[in-house]
Image (spheres, helix red, strand yellow):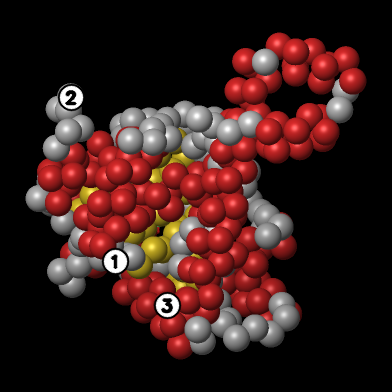
Amino acid sequence: MPSDADLLERFRSGDVRALARAISLVERRDPTVRDLEDALRSDSRLPGVTGFTGAPGTGKSTLVDAVVSLLRTRKQSVAVLATDPNSPFTGGAILGDRIRMQRHALDPKVFIRSMGARGHLGGLSLASREAIRLLGAFGFDEVILETVGVGQSELEVAAVADTTVVVLTPNLGDSVQMIKAGILEIADVFVVNKADIDGHGRVVAELRTMLNMAPKTSWKPPIIPTVATRQEGVEQLWVAVLAHRTHLEKTGKAKELSERRLRDETAEVAAELARERTRRALREDPTLAERLLKDGTPYRTAEEILRTRTDN
Ligand SMILES: Nc1nc2c(ncn2[C@@H]2O[C@H](COP(=O)(O)OP(=O)(O)OP(=O)(O)O)[C@@H](O)[C@H]2O)c(=O)[nH]1
Ligand SMILES: [Mg+2]
């Protein structure tokens, strides 16, 4: 592995391996990436960030692949971050079947990378936010996040993406009534994929009824039917994503959102630092640890640690 001494230079010159290396540092929470980030700050522009989430096998990767193709015909560069909440760190290895985008593998304007989330302090959102800033500094126009909708992962994606696309299909066995709680709130755009199979119309109709019953908001999530395997509906999908982006800009929500996220991210990082500091104090100070065990006072001990310890 090349040394990191010239990482900044290689990154600036557009060396994709330097980008991959920087994201690995982020993934491992290696603080040396901070110098790179500081140096890059002035180059940074934020890319458009679109998240795709949905149950396993709904066709997210196939759709994302089709969106990548569409964006490439428009001469836009695009990075795909595929995250799997069930996998440990991948070090950038492609998560087998989960990503079906091999046809873009040789296109230098397409960057595809997977990130594992298991065991990641602060969850996926901290790592993906940092990765998105790096991708922006590297010059990518668009970033697409794909995550399997299990556990909390779709909420984490929604916390990072400007626009969240929730992918449903007719053959999930669950009718729309059984859509996981919380999904309606995070969806900016619904895709009902696999429009080529039976039951599609019913899912669309049920979803529409359900959305009509939801409280009125300034943005009503559109429902886009697609056949990802045939690239059908993909242009309409992207029109909907861009319309949502325009809505965010026009209503001032884009600015509000990015400010709120910076505050939230800072709070999350602070929580993570405090956690690390506390674990270290308890590990390195047997007296403190013994007292905690004897008295059973986690709150008081935590407050004391935060009040009296520093990291250096
Ligand atoms: N009939 C039909 N099959 C589709 C369509 N889109 C995707 N598929 C198939 O559905 C299967 C799953 O597609 P993926 O794109 O891997 O789905 P995914 O949501 O990324 O799956 P995970 O990442 O494992 O959650 C594959 O066999 C696809 O070929 C579609 O529009 N119609
Ligand atoms: Mg996939």
Residue positioned 76% across, 37% down in the render? 303
User: Disc 1 or 3, which lies upstream in sequence?
Assistant: 1
**Front position among marks 1 and 3:** 1
Q: Residue 87 placed where, x, y %? A: 48, 31
Q: Name the residue under label 1.
A: 45
Residue positioned 14% across, 51% down in the render? 12
Residue lying at the far right in this picture: please name it. 295
Question: Label 2: how many residues lie within 10 Å, few (<14), some (14-19) or many (20+)?
Answer: few
Q: Residue 295 placed where, x, y %? A: 90, 20
Label 2 and label 3: CA atoms lie apart by 40 Å
Q: Mark 3 points at which residue?
A: 245
Q: What residue type is labelled 1?
A: Arg
Secondary element under disc 2, as helix, strand or loop, is: loop
Q: Mark 2 points at which residue?
A: 1
Secondary element under disc 3, as helix, strand or loop, is: helix
| Left or right: residue 169 compared with residue 234 | right
Label 2 and label 1: CA atoms lie apart by 29 Å
Secondary element under disc 1, as helix, strand or loop, is: loop
Q: In this view, does 228 lie above or below 61?
A: below
Q: Residue 121 placed where, x, y %? A: 55, 36
Residue positioned 27% across, 45% down in the render? 36
Q: What residue type is labelled 3?
A: Arg
Residue 21 in sight from this viewpoint: yes
User: Disc 2 or 3, which lies upstream in sequence?
Assistant: 2
Q: Is the residue marked 2 within 8 Å of ligand 2, measured from its CB?
A: no
Q: What residue type is labelled 2?
A: Met
